[in-house]
Image (cartoon, helix red, strand yellow):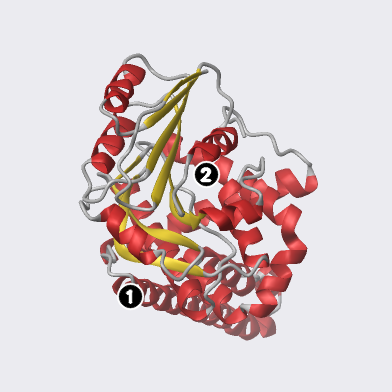
Amino acid sequence: MALQQTALSETLPLSIVIPSYRGGGRLLRLVESLLSCEGRPLDLVVVVDEPEEGVVEELSRLCAEGRCRLIVRRSRSGKVSALNEALPLVGGDVVLFLDDDVAVEDPLFLKKVAKEMEGCDIADIKKVVVGRGLLAGLVYMEYVAYNFASKLMAKLAGRTIAVNGAAFAIRREALRALGGFRRRLSEDFDLALRAFLLGLRFKYIDSTYVLNYAPSSWGKWMKQRKRWAVALASWLKENWRALLSAARRMTHVLIPGLIASLPSLVTTGLALALYNQAYAKAAYAILVPVASLLREALPFAALFTVTLHVAYAVTTLVLALVVALLGLLHVAIARYVRMRSRAHLLPIYLLFYQPLWLTVILAGLVRVLLLGNEKVDDWVV
């Protein structure tokens, strides 16, 4: 392990921690953009595991200018380990945590975060997905809902059970009271839930934002979501009692937030409930051959055919209306969080993307809750 440390400006009572695996161009651009923001952080600590060639040299150059601290770890020790190793090195009243693949384009980003943290203990920061193509558009829509859920918890409850670890801030004394990060697959959700149980004040920061990059392919999306699903299932398994307690206290917040974030719970449940026509199909299959033998049975078979068609038409109409309502809800949510709705993608989002994501989540729940397997390939906690 190599540690480089330099004197930093004390303009803002804000420290920044960025854990990274391998580093890369996005990490370098992030550090440069943070250092060019108005108002310098008290500390900026970057922890890099198994850095790519050239990354250490570039970060060392920035540190040599007296503007950041760099910890280089030659083996992959994991994100939680990186976060906890950085914490003793920071001295700001507020600690800002950023993933190495986010981007900051607002020159007032640090000043706004420091200002917003007045009067709260922990805050989630608005995230906007960028990227080209269908997948990026669908992930963008998903993050519209995630931002809404976070804003809703801040406005109506002032507390939260989850934050998106790609960009959030917390007061250092609050982090100390929580005992830092625990070794969990979803260390961000784990920290937020413990903050909820401790009664810490929560805010959603939307006066500024970070950019998140969508996965560049469906294969990478699936790999990411499998990890998320296992992490979510593990979090639910460990904390179900606390989550039930939170649900009782914040039902008015959690239910709309859950529906907005995972509308496939509604559409899939409705489809399974409405399209249970097994008995009708069996009766129709019996009536048709009977009608061919008994002329008197023909009217009954014909009437049953009409009834079956009407039943399918009604159930299809109900499902279509629900999908339309969810689409309108998404448009309203997008306006509420001041983001674009991408309304032209709503049919694909609601009828393909969301059911696919729900299936991955359910598979993760089965894997963890029934099979007891919480291992994630190519990931170190």
Picture quarter with the C terminus: top right
In terms of sequence position, does the residue under pointer 2 or pointer 1 come before the other?
Answer: 2
Find residue 60 and report its image quarter.
Answer: top left
Answer whether residue 190 is visible to the viewer in this image: no
Residue 333 location (% of width, % of height)? 36, 73
Residue 115 location (% of width, % of height)? 34, 64
Q: Residue at x 52, y 44 (%)?
A: 225
Q: Is residue 269 left or right of residue 2?
A: right
- Please name which of the two marks, 2 or 1, marks the residue nearer to the observer: 1
Q: Is residue 247 above or below residue 26?
A: below
Residue 114 location (% of width, % of height)? 36, 59
Q: Is residue 124 above or below residue 21?
A: below
**Disc 2 to disc 1, C-alpha distance:** 27 Å
Q: Nearer the viewer, residue 15 or 11?
A: 11
What residue does disc 1 label? 336
Q: Is residue 369 left or right of residue 82?
A: right
Q: Nearer the viewer, residue 8 or 213?
A: 8
Q: Residue at x 58, y 67 (%)?
A: 200
Residue 236 location (% of width, % of height)? 70, 56
Disc tally is 2
Q: Nearer the viewer, residue 232 or 307?
A: 232
Q: Is residue 258 above or below residue 173?
A: below
Q: Nearer the viewer, residue 282 or 92?
A: 92
Q: Residues within 10 Å of mark 2 (few under 14, many from 20)?
A: some
Judged from this view, the residue extending furthest toward the top is 53
> Three-letter amino acid code at disc 2?
Arg
What residue does disc 2 label? 225
Q: Is residue 223 above or below residue 136?
A: above
Answer whether residue 214 is visible to the viewer in this image: yes
